[in-house]
Amino acid sequence: MSENFNKRKIINRVSASAIILFWLAFTAVFFFTFTEKQAYPILYKEEIIAVSEKYGIDPALVFAIVRTESGFAPHTVSAKGATGLMQIMPSTGKYIADKKGVAEYDLFEVSTNLDFGCYYWKYLSERFYGLTETAAAYNAGEGTVSGWLKNIEYSADGKRLEYIPYRETREYVKKIYESLERYRKLYAKLLDKP
């Protein structure tokens, strides 16, 4: 009798431990995913998906750029004067407006900022080899990256950057890659359209 009682006691303890471990694991996964989605939010979803489709840019990349540039704060202005969600410099905004034939625009307006930012990203992506070079140009400027590509210390082939001399730009490119990876993982089904 006591042997059966001891076996049941052990089985009950193992079962209780398994249930506790399951709930701890479930809670940890839920909390991690919830916390990670708070760190990588999907804000301005309709606008970002629409503009990414318009310019043929991966929407996960647009979310990554906006998160890195402004943290989704549409009225952000950097110390250098970059404005809005995608942090567009006034001179770049004027250049884009001229190219698009737009006389009046407001870089604080979400749809305008996203449109101008994606237009400029698309332009840079057609000018430079890959994501690293495009992101570096978006951050440091087209002329700066063109100069780096001509320097054998930074580029062996004149197309790909092997080293980014500006620390801020190196960190920016790294953040873009990290955010892009997180958005693709967290929102794969939502953002599966190129």
Image: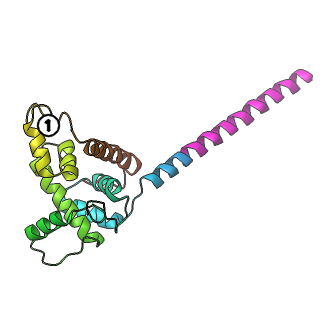
Quarter of the image where the N terminus is located: top right
Residue span colored magenta: 1-29
Taking the spot 12% from the left edge, 34% from the top edge, the residue there is 155
Taking the spot 33% from the left edge, 45% from the top edge, the residue there is 175
Residue ID for mark 1: 160
Residue 49 pos. (x, y %): 29, 62
Q: Is residue 5 left or right of residue 112?
A: right
Residue 177 pos. (x, y %): 30, 43
Determine the image quadrant of residue 42.
Answer: bottom left
For the residue labelled by badge 1, is the local secondary structure a helix, a strand or a loop?
Answer: loop
Mark 1 is surrounded, within 10 Å at the Cα level, by few (under 14), some (14 to 19) or many (20 or more) other residues, namely: some
Taking the spot 15% from the left edge, 50% from the top edge, the residue there is 125
Q: Is residue 153 above or below residue 53?
A: above
Q: Is residue 56 above or below residue 21?
A: below
Q: Is residue 139 above or below residue 3?
A: below
The amino acid sitting under disc 1 is Arg
Q: Is residue 53 left or right of residue 8?
A: left
